Image: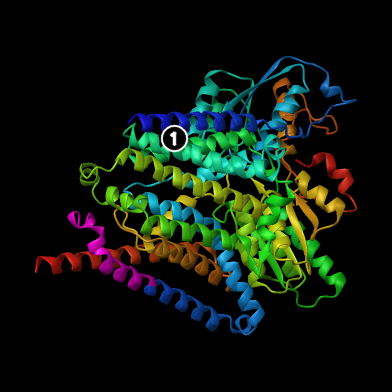
Amino acid sequence: MITETLPAEKREPRRLDEGTIRNLGLIGVLVLLVIIGIITRPELYSDPAWVRNNILVILQQASAIGVVTVGMTFVIIGGGIDLSVGAIIALAGVWCTTVATQSFGAAGMIFTALMVGIGVGLVNGLLIAYGKLVPFIATLAMLVAARGLAAQISDKQTQISTNETINAIATTRIFGIPLLVYILAAVAAAGWVLLNRTTFGRRTVAIGGNEEAARLAGINVKRQTVLLYVLSGLCCGIAAIMLTSQATSAQAGMANLYELDAIAAAIIGGTLLSGGRGTIVGAVFGVLVFSTITNLFAINNLETEVQNMVKGGIIVAAVLIQQFRYQSLTQLFKK
Amino acid sequence: MSALSRRRVLFGGAAVGAGALLTACTSNNPTENTQVNTNEGNDNAAPGEKVVIGFSAPAADHGWIGAITSNAKAQAGQYSDVELKLTEAGADAATQRAAIATLIAEKPNIIVMLPYDGKELNAAGIQAMQAGIPVVNLDRAFPSAAAYRLQIKGDNYGMGLAAGAYIGAQLKAKGVSSPVIGEIAGIDSLELTQERSQGFTTALAVYGFKVANRRAADFTVNGGQQAATDLLQALPKMDALWNHDDDQGIGVLAAIDQAKRSEFFMVGGAGSKAAIDTITKDDKVLKATVTYSPSMASSAISLARLIAQGKGMSDLVELQVPKEIMLSSETITKENAAQYAKLGF
């Protein structure tokens, strides 16, 4: 597997194939969830207006976490992990809703959120690439520290956004579809192009597959690592604006456990936790599966704890399938 | 290589510039909004012997806990004979236990403690009491009566009852026979959330009503926004909604605006300033909120001072402060909002 990663062009057709199968599988899961929804709540699904709105609600609920997952997918493919995404969102959200930042208007708030995201990502990246900290530890430390700073800045209070432009992001619809969904689509499309059609993407796959081989092949592994965490931070900055707009406020506790949701979505989307492989489309489908499950449980008035158990089961199942496929592939090679 | 370092200098310069700009943006000037008793015309307020009060509360990032600590500080500031020793309780029960042990060693006259968890900090309370330091147990109750001198807490079950009674009465007055009622809870694994929900169900049952859909959020604004979005989608038509917590209520109200829904009325919980303002303005679905006021921290400081000075509550016959006080959960509506405005946090 390791040696295979480098000649990416040669592997392209088969990898695409496998990805397509997996994505079809995820679409199958989505269809199954919708069918369960139709069976359990036929009276709701018989109203076309409700169904249309429900699709938009599912997409909208997936939008912010989807953006985070795109960044997370890059980090994981590059052989890392970013546990600090929820904390970065909280810090960016809180920072961009302080009284001082709000006085600069919507542009100032957006600039601040993005800069905080990029800045924290940069610190993560430098610590990992040049400080030689294990990604798990570095970003875990950042998780704690960034939430602490967010609590410090907000004085543990909920900061209400009084900026109409920011608050309108969540309510704006273009051709009947929420702006938030367009943002997710744009980020996912940009992520897909970056991963599949640029040297940045190839380098990411290369350093995640085999860091040493990538280094010997002339890739600046350290710089690439830093950039990956910056990218993840940037996605968090974007998500912070989306969430702040949705809740018309920000607080240090926001985006709680987003890191786990984003990692889980990336994993069930077919990203290898050890790095070197993964797809953006799969990650987005992963987010949609979770968002659809939440919706299914909500319309059936089922308790959140059952939902969490089902989510856990799905993650385990996805990884088991991944391992099984991996093993059967390697066995094929041995023969 | 030189091109690269030039680029690095450029990027570095940009980063420093952005950093400088950002640090300027952390300045925050939230309006001070603490709940204090100014003690005018109260004999007990006359300066007495000096009291050192040790105070410990979780370092949570929720508005309510924030208000607890700032209220305690503000109330202590009202007395010339009180010195408040604040200890950060850190991030969990174990750290708070350690913080309490340090506090006991400093021998304050009395300790006011809002524990992470009453059961987990029970032993710490007993330890302090045995060291001869009376403990005022704030809000989250110690199971053992030996662990506190005074317990002052809110009424979670009563909160649910009040919300249910208000919703029941309103719907009955409107003549709705089988209403669709929604509920957005806080963190579901907490005992207080369960108590609130039980109270709510019990009160609704009096009217023969029940909850059609219940979503649990996490006491955060965006948790509230997401739970409310799900709930609204699940209930295309709703008559009434109870949201357990006004802080997450900001997110709930945002979700309601975003879904363009207004066919129902909503009741909040806790009694935040933002909620009371919205109720007063009467321009949103939020028509009432049931209190769970962090003003109890201010009262805890006042009573801790009295206990340490050996004084009683002047309106009562008893010479000493009673052992347990449970605040009643009051219903704030447009009619009495002005009266409660100063209690909003």
**Quadrant occupied by the N terminus of chain B:** top left
Residue placed furthest toward the left: A335
Part of the protein shown in magenta: A1-23
Question: Residue furthest toward the top?
Answer: B49
The residue at the point 37 percent across, 33 percent down is: B4
Determine whether, in the image, residue A84 is placed left or right of residue B268: left
- The residue at 53%/78% (across/down) is A37
Q: Is mark 1 on a helix, strand or loop?
A: helix
Which residue occupies 65% across, 52% down? A245
**Chain at numbered mark 1:** A
- Asked whether the viewer can see residue B219, the reply is no
How many marks on residues? 1
Amino acid type, label 1:
Val
User: Is residue B140 placed above or below B204 in the rendered structure?
Assistant: above
Image position, residue A182 (x, y; %): 57, 62
Q: Name the residue under label 1.
A: A123
Above-or-below relation of B224 to A85: below
Q: In which quarter of the image is residue B286?
A: bottom right
Q: Which of A89 and A306 is in front in this view?
A: A89
Check the picture and name the quadrant holding the C terminus of chain B: top right
Q: Where is residue B289 in the image (x, y as percent from the top left)?
A: 78, 53
In x, y percent, where is residue B162? 77, 57
Please name the predominant secondary structure of the magenta segment in the image: helix
Task: From the viewer's side, name the closer residue of A27 and B40.
Answer: A27
Check residue A9 for magenta coloring. Answer: yes
**Residue B257 located left or right of residue A207:** right
| A214, above or below B180, in the image | above
Q: Position of residue A291 (x, y in %)?
A: 52, 65
The residue lying toward the viewer, choosing from B49 and A125, is A125
